[in-house]
Amino acid sequence: MAAPKSSSYDPEFLTDCWIANSNSHEKAHLIDSYARYTPEIGWRAILSVLQHPRALQNSNLPSNALEMLISRYGDFFIDRIEREAATSPAFKACLAEIHPSPVFPLPEHLWLRLSAAAGRPVGPMRKGMASLYYKIPDLAEVATKDMNPLDPSKVPDLSDAELLEHAAAYREYHESFWAWEELNRIIEEVGPDTAWPLILRLVEKGSDAVLGAVGAGVLEELLDRYSVDVIERIEAQARRDSRFRLCLSHVWPSAMPAEIWQRVVVARGDEPQRG
């Protein structure tokens, strides 16, 4: 589900990709969490992503996870990293995508070995990135904040087959992320008349979990930006569509005016506030 090469797209393809992105979100993000908190499972998960036949074309996909793992556990994995890079072109290409940063700094004493394994310099930090973190002192703290950290003692010992499922979700998520970005761009730059039918497609085709993501995401954004322009069509849709009311129950007031929020609450009927 790669992004179209031009800005034109088929609406059904866009919404299908958006739904695929939402459905794969949870398992995809677990790979980053495994690399951060459970290094052995994280290592296996990264290798699972890179087992795919197209891995060399998308070798940058697990680079963030690999960067986290090396930042925290590099001394324990450096020998394995060197062996894997020597035999796997996809892994070597992935390794070449990592770089030191204040978010997940790479152990400086490993820079030479990592550089030799990657076939390109790994460290020091790029000047542009260093300047960015200098200008925004809180950026590193915000970027590393994890609202749902894993408890390593409660993570199951996943089988290879289960890790391959996570790896497939990881690829699906990153390859379909363009659809999430595109729908947000439409809301922000094009306007509600184009975004509205796309949101209705998501409500029609998505699972209950997807409805939650739509309500807490693009529908809430639509109301925040264009509340006066869209509230009547939202009320009309809620009257005739129970799935839309479920979706609406995941909307929070955020930036919308108080009187619009009260109309949203009435429109969702018996549905409780969710999310």
Image: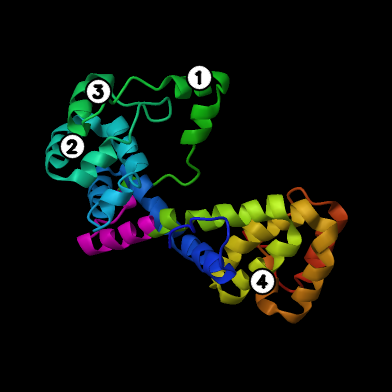
Residue 97 lies in what quarter of the image? top left
Nearest the viewer among 75 and 177 is 177
Position of residue 88 measured from the top left corner of the image (x, y, whole percent): 16, 45
User: CA separation, marks 1 and 4?
Assistant: 43 Å
Q: Amino acid at mark 3?
A: Trp
Q: Which residues are magenta?
A: 153-171
**Mark 4 = which residue?**
200
**Mark 1 = which residue?**
131
In terms of sequence position, does the residue under pointer 1 or pointer 4 come before the other? 1
**Mark 3 = which residue?**
111
In terms of sequence position, does the residue under pointer 3 or pointer 4 come before the other? 3
Look at the image and tell me in which quarter the C terminus lies. bottom right
User: CA separation, marks 4 and 2?
Assistant: 47 Å
- The single residue placed furthest to the bottom in the displayed view is 240
Classify 10 Å Cα crowding around label 4: few (below 14), some (14-19), many (20 and above).
Answer: some
**Mark 2 = which residue?**
81
User: CA separation, marks 3 and 4?
Assistant: 50 Å
Q: Residue at x 78, y 78 (%)?
A: 239
| Residue 37 visible somewhere in the drawing | no
